[in-house]
Image (tube, rainbow, N blue to C red):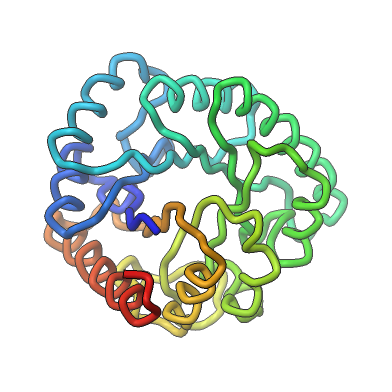
Amino acid sequence: MKLGANSVLFGGHDLEVAFRCLAMAGYDGIELSAIDGMSQHLVLDRWPELVKPIQTYAATYGLALLAMEQPSQDLARMETAFQAAAEIGIPIVNCGPGGKTSEPETLQSSIDTLGKLADLAGKYGVTLCVKAHVGCSIWNTPTTLQAMAAITSPHFGIDMDPSHIHRAGENPVEALGAVVSRVKHVHIRDCKGREQGPGKPEMQANGRGDIDLLGYLRVLHEAGYSGPVDLEVIGAKEYSLEQCAVIAAETRGHMQACLQACGAR
């Protein structure tokens, strides 16, 4: 497994700062945030001018470019994301599932759109991943399984986030086994309680909440998963650099200890 973090944790700071701090914390790689409003890191409206700087940062700080997160399902926006990913050398683009949990009829529409986007991702040689997200049409294991059954493209995968599965009322360790065969990316963070949101940024650090992340990583290891495991902490845009760096370092230590405990490192 490759341990990384989404640069959105450092959304209030520039991208090179995120690279530098994650390298200092010992991460293997980075997921680039293309999330409007949460960061100004991989800004898709001007991605061509960011190719060389990003590649230079990756080489300078020794971090693999593991993934990109761009939440929209808009076809034109996603094609831009795929173009940028292919040119920069990013293998995975994570997007949101769309739709609403409260409107079950939106599930099929979301699945249809994701299928088309997976085919488009294939044209650019990248992989599209989607995760169950509280409040959206794909929000738990049953709806994830429906998407898996309907979308057979090799350029489609599941982005498994234990915090959303936990907040959906499931046990993430048990749920992971049902979908792990199609997992190609993991967004990881902890969560205290089962409220709608993930909590304050510092409480999203691995080891701060209620999720059995050791058991979760053990299931991934035993399934032979070797892809990215990227910390995704939201809400820290106004945090100081010290606060962001501490969250990153604390989580990296916890993940390393978990991998060692289950024999993965």
Q: Is residue 251 visible?
A: yes
Between residue 24 and residue 17, name the one nearer to us. 24
* Residue shown at the point (68%, 45%) measured from the top left: 98
Above or below, 74 against 33 in this view is above
Residue 206 shown left or right of residue 73 in the figure? left
* Residue shown at the point (54%, 41%) measured from the top left: 71
Residue 131 shown left or right of residue 14 in the figure? right
Q: Quarter-wise, where is residue 230 in the image?
A: bottom left
Residue 82 shown left or right of residue 264 in the figure? right
* Residue shown at the point (46%, 68%) measured from the top left: 198
Between residue 134 and residue 238, name the one nearer to us. 134
The number of callouts visible is 0
Residue 167: image x %, image y %?
Answer: 59, 74
Above or below, 260 against 45 in this view is below
Above or below, 61 against 204 in this view is above
* Residue shown at the point (55%, 26%) measured from the top left: 125
Residue 245: image x %, image y %?
Answer: 17, 59
Q: Is residue 232 visible?
A: no
Given the current orientation, which residue lies at the most extreme top position?
A: 48
Residue 49: image x %, image y %?
Answer: 29, 15
Q: Quarter-wise, where is residue 27 in the image?
A: bottom left
Given the current orientation, which residue lies at the most extreme right position?
A: 105
Q: For the N terminus, which image quadrant?
A: bottom left
Q: For the C terminus, which image quadrant?
A: bottom left
